[in-house]
Image (tube, helix red, strand yellow):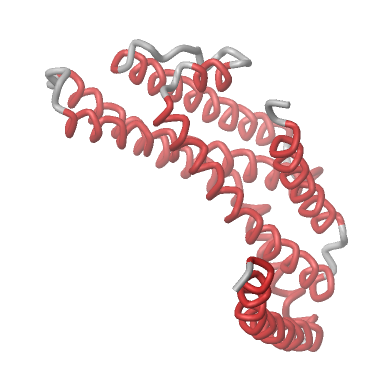
């Protein structure tokens, strides 16, 4: 069997599964769209209730989230610091535990930032003129403090990592921090980062499809308009274009 025949055989083998998934997706999408269209009033009512709830409570959710996230991340930081102070500089198992804790701390902090931006925008956008000047100021202060404490936490985590690994370079407050940090990583760390980025790219390609589908259905059923779908498509296009640009022209 030559290579061309091998390719054709592999394509025929995969084609059946592909068409099954395509047909099932079309049927499911059609059913959901049909039911949603028939239940427009119900979903519009749910959407209005959710909008009203978020307009009244987004600030309190943001405040509660900020307290919880900051409490958890700083508890993890203190736990990692305690391990570091008892570390003899040679035990790899302890070093891995510290790295894991710092990684989790950074993960939670970044999730906190995303939620903070979302809830702040939601509160401002939904309440608009109904929000008093005093409440708007308090909302902004809580948001800024949350982000500020998060940045300090990230700085602590990065400085901590640099203490463990003196070869690491870069400051959180430097605009080119990520570039400097990557240059100071060894090949194994870079490979791990690249693999993580590739997995994130694959997951996001699937996530964009579902996000696009949700915004289209929401436009049909709840009348939210096309802007959300446009933004999803723009972000999807940016990610795809950046990936292919670098894969084609990198190191040329």
Which residue is at a point 80% across and 54% down the rendered structure image?
Answer: 233
Query: Against 89, is 201 above or below?
Result: below
Query: Against 21, is 94 above or below?
Result: above
x, y percentage for residue 65? 48, 44
x, y percentage for residue 58? 61, 49
Label count reads 0
Which residue is at a point 41% across and 23% down the rendered structure image?
Answer: 186
Quarter the C terminus occupies: top right
Which residue is at a point 32% across and 16% down the rendered structure image?
Answer: 165
The residue closer to the viewer here, 235 or 2, is 2
Which residue is at a point 33% across and 18% down the rendered structure image?
Answer: 160
- Locate residue 117 relative to residue 70 in the image: left or right: right
The residue closer to the viewer here, 247 or 79, is 247
The residue closer to the viewer here, 242 or 72, is 242
Query: Against 155, is 5 above or below?
Result: below
Query: Looking at the rendering, which quadrant does residue 100 occupy?
Result: top left
x, y percentage for residue 76? 30, 34
Quarter the N terminus occupies: bottom right
The residue closer to the viewer here, 236 or 102, is 236
């Amino acid at each position: 069997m030559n290579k061309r025949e091998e390719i054709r055989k592999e394509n025929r083998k995969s084609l059946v599964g592909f068409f099954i998934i395509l047909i099932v997706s079309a049927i499911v999408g059609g059913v959901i769209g049909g039911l949603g269209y028939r239940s427009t009033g119900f979903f519009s009512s749910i959407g209005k209730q959710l909008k009203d709830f978020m307009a009244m409570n987004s600030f309190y959710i943001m405040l509660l989230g900020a307290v919880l996230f900051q409490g958890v991340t700083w508890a993890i930081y203190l736990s990692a610091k305690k391990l570091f102070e008892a570390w003899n500089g040679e035990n790899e198992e302890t070093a891995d535990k510290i790295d894991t804790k710092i990684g989790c701390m950074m993960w939670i902090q970044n999730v906190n930032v995303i939620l903070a931006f979302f809830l702040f925008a939601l509160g401002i956008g939904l309440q608009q003129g109904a929000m008093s000047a005093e409440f708007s100021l308090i909302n902004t202060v809580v948001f800024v403090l949350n982000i500020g404490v998060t940045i300090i936490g990230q700085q602590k985590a990065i400085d901590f990592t640099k203490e463990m690994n003196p070869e690491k370079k870069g400051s959180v407050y430097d605009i080119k921090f990520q570039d400097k940090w990557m240059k100071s990583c060894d090949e194994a760390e870079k490979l791990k980062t690249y693999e993580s980025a590739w997995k994130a790219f694959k997951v996001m390609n699937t996530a964009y499809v579902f996000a696009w589908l949700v915004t289209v259905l929401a436009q049909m059923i709840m009348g939210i308009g096309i802007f959300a779908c446009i933004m999803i498509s723009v972000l999807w296009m940016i990610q795809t274009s950046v990936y292919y640009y670098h894969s084609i022209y990198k190191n040329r």
